[in-house]
Image: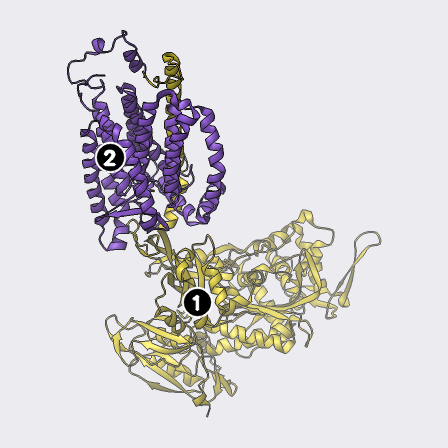
Chain colours: A yellow, B purple
Amino acid sequence: MMFARTEKFQPDEKKILREFRTRFLLLKTFFALFFAAVAVRLLNIQVLEAPKYQALARKQYEQRFILPATRGNVYDRNGNVLISNTIFVSFAADPKFVKGHAGEIATRFAQVFGKPRSQYLEKLTAENKRFAWLERRVKPETAKLIRQDKLEGVVVINEPKRIYHYDDLAGPLFGFTDIDNKGISGLELELDEEVRGTNGSIVMQRDGLGRSRPSADYPRVEPVNGRDVTLTLDLTYQAILEEELKRGIKANGADGGLAVMMNPATGEILAVSIFPSLNPNDAYRHNPGEVRNRLVTDLFEPGSVFKIVTAAAAYEYRLTSPETRYNAEGGTWKINLGGKTFRLIKDTHEHDIITFQEAVEVSSNIVMAKVVKSIGPERFYRQARDFGFGIPTGVELPGELRGRLKKPNEWSGTTLQTMSYGYEVAVTPLQIVQAYAAVANKGILMKPYIVSQIRSSDGTVTSEQRPQKIRSVISEETCALLSHAFEGTVERGTAKDVRLQNVRIAGKTGTSRKYVDGKYSTKSYTASFVGYFPVEDPQIVCLVMMDNPRNRGYYGGSTSGPVFRAVAERILNTSSRFSRPTIAQTGKLEEQPEEISVPDVRTLRRNLAKKILETRGLKSQFFGKGDVVVRQSPEPGRKIEQGEIVTLALKNDFTPAAGSSTVIPDVRGMSVRRAMNQLMLDDFDVRVEGSGVVVQQSPAPGQRVKAGATVVLECSPKTVNSASLY
Amino acid sequence: MTDIQRNHIDLPLLTAVLILMVLSLGVVYSASATWAYEKFGDSDRMLNSHALKILIGIAALFMGMMVKYTAYKKLTKFSLIAAILILAVTLVLGGEVKGATRWLRVGGFGFQPSEFAKFALLFHLCALIAAKGDLIKDFKRGFVPMMIWICSVSLLVMLQPNLSSGAMIILLSCVMLFVSRARILHLLGTLLTVLPLAGLFLMSAPYRVERIRSFITGSSGGNYNYQLWQGIIGFGNGGILGVGPGESKQRDFFLPESYGDFVFSIIGEEYGLLGTAFFLALFLLIMLRGFKIAKYARDDFSRLLAIAITSTITMYALVNAGVTLGILPTTGLPMPFVSYGGSSLVFSSFAVGVLLNISAYTDLHPRAPRMRETVIGPETDEIAVRKVY
């Protein structure tokens, strides 16, 4: 019947039916294909590509904010804070969510920070970015201006920043961190894993309008602050060493210098000074690559200081004695190398027949070259190796080199002779100190170290380093002979400038050439002196090297030697820990020069402090109640006239009993460093915001709080107060 | 044809539609709660409105089911003229929503006349074709008169401007003409004349150009592409199992109008592939039942009507899914029975009611013991035709 009612088209039922069925089938097919297309697309998006879209979705509705961990503090061996942190405020924004009011935000930031508005606008409108720093490490008072506006979409992040309490003191040793507070050089790099801590995070769930709330799916992860590190460094020694080295470099017109001080009995590094120095507080001025701990990264051809190996081996194998006589050939010795080739060895001082002891004292290359023949390559090589040359010391400093000590099979015909007085070998300064320390330590080689203890932020000790004996290098008899020779060097030989009246010093001079790119520099000389004292019970071994000294020649004895002497003198005068027994033993304290350096009597009992000051010809005045000295003025090391008064602050106990209450001192107007040191000495925890001078403190001064309470210091950069000028 | 006994309606079809309606309550609630709270301070506001529309829709469905389909035969011309008038009035008086006058408010209710006009046109086309029979193959007497109706309705809708609904009206009309054996030549010829005009029309509005451009290039930028992109992220975020009921993140203002044309994405996000597949399966079921009803329909009018209604529902569902999935350019077409929005829901429900009514006059579900052998025999042509369809 269908469609068959016209005259024009004759009804042909079968044809009509077929045509309708075909068309209907085509329609069904179309829909079937459509369904299939949708299904395939769904499979594709929801199964195959689901992870991609899930990540995209998460990126949209979740934002993770890092809660930065605070890096651990670094202390010296006496608990003085060397490195800690201050908190700065940083501002960031999510460009995606500030679209509407990017202009408003940019205007406000431009007003507050005085930078072009376009700069902020550019960051705020960055395409496809979800995070942009607007300002970092803003001073708290400036930050307040932005904070009070409560600009929507602007994220406020408290960022800790490293603060180095003594600026360039041991700067190259400490290294510094980058803007993200990650250690990138020096100890900061080496200890990064320990002091870095683990950043916490908070996940915010946000909606399409940019509003966020803490996500219920992810708990807030609190940051775990980094571990605190106690170094073997002694702040006082460090200060002395740096000061004296600096003075020595200036006096000699040298390019730079390096000095290191170690406790020979333990291998603890007490002080490291490297010049030119750097101030990690201004680290942005420095390229991390140019900051090297030259102590372990620079190689030298050691010169005469290497004669320790020759002399040690000669004594150890009983091939010579201090009285054995040698012909020093009048200062010039020609060695026939077979055929017509000769090798010329020269001494700086001309001698004919001298004893071995004298040969060491005057640093005769010729005698060493003669003696070394009887030692032979194998024994000589082993001796050098045993002293630690050619082997990295393993100290906790980045980039340590092993040096270059050729094996006997690599030697040429004259290598043995050349090496006997310190050429054809490359060593690091620390290796030299390590070797001399072994002589000072009855022949036992100690591993040098600088990190003594690491504690987690809750105070538990996570690792502790104890002195580590590497090997016995030489016998005690050999040590005695060597010490005798080195003491003679100071008394009569090349290091006469080092001699001090009250203390026996042993040491050796040397003129080294820098080893750069596999070659010895011909232009650059390094004058060095390495020694230890007191000889009868060595407490300190110290190496001083100076690059290209010009004013007084390049001999170690006359350039680096005086630096060593000055350091030794000041240490003997100041260090309570070290000098007390020595002073008691020598008993020669009456013969002090008029200028006296103030000894460190902090932490000592009242009577003992008084006694020590009295023996130096100083008067003491006490204030405060108690039995223990907590502060002193003038500071230790300061030179004052005989008979002057040293003021000492007393306290009942150095560490106040828990629960006792203390009055908070007024530290306003002090520099951050001074304020922190004072408060920490009083056993307060200190949190610093900003840097410069303390402008606010909380709790307020004079308030009584429990011992160990946290004091918050608000600081701002130093400004000259015009009123104070008139 | 004598008076035919009324049999049972097609229950699977009714069930599928009712399931869609009930599920839409949950989906629309989840997709709209944050928006409703943001706009009206009441997260239930849109759910309540949607529930009311579903009730009206169910009422419309039962109305369509009750009235015998033959009643429309005489009514189609009148209602189509009425629809055209209403469209014209809307153009002049209609309320503007997002730059288009698509709404007409009658009493307290606003409705989209285009939805009414769409069904009025399709119903009238069915009546015309059934009456004219093979005349459809005649250009002047069959094809052109029908094209005039089609063009006037679709043009008025497009002028609102509502390009996508107009295009759907043309598409569905052409589907009907195609199934009714109109000459392919006529259809193609019309297409070739209409296409350049459509192109010009398309270019006349920058937002359309932008939609097409972003669809073709797949580039980012542009709000329409943003919505599409968020929709796709929603599907992907759901994965196979979905993030769970009420857990959609995209509806938190990432996906604009998540409760409307892009509600399918929220289904995909909350219920995963399982959810989208289930909804697709329901529409597939509706299509299969609808075409089965067409096959068993007793006369040309009801057969064509069944095809028209089924095609409309299926086409809207597929185009909506295709748009949200990015395989078609972004258009504002709802997913029948699921998307938030009254007019589409009410008229689609009514149309399904009519389809169910048609099903009751087939032998799909006979009231009495099946008498198929006696009723459908090889004796007459009439029966033979019906059997084949």
Pointer 1 local density, CA inside 10 Å: few below 14, some 14–19, many at least 20: some
Image-based side of A334 in relation to B301, left or right: right
Bin the neighbour count of mark 2 within 10 Å (Cα to Cα): few under 14, some 14-19, many 20 and up: many
x then y, percent, for residue A184:
50, 59
> Residue at 77% across / 62% down in the picture?
A333
Image location of residue A376, percent across then percent down: 67, 52
How far is the residue under mark 1 from the one under mark 2?
Answer: 64 Å
Q: Which residue is mark 1?
A: A137
Q: Residue furthest left?
A: B368
Whether marks 1 and 2 lie on the same chain: no
For the N terminus of chain A, the quadrant is top left
Please state which of residues A160 and B83 is positioned toward the viewer in this rendering.
Answer: B83
The image quadrant that residue A302 belongs to is bottom right
Secondary structure under the numbered disc 2 in the rendered image: helix
Coordinates of residue A24 in the picture (x, y in percent): 37, 22
Name the residue rendered at 26%, 19% in the picture.
Answer: B298
SS at mark 1?
Answer: strand
Residue that carries the numbered disc 2 in the rendered image: B349
Residue B82 vs A693, above or below: the answer is above
Q: Is residue A380 above or below residue B330?
A: below
Residue A226 shown left or right of residue A265 in the figure: left
Asked whether residue B278 is in view, the answer is yes
Amino acid type shown at disc 2: Ser
Q: Residue at x 73, y 51 (%)?
A: A412
Q: Residue at x 40, y 80 (%)?
A: A670
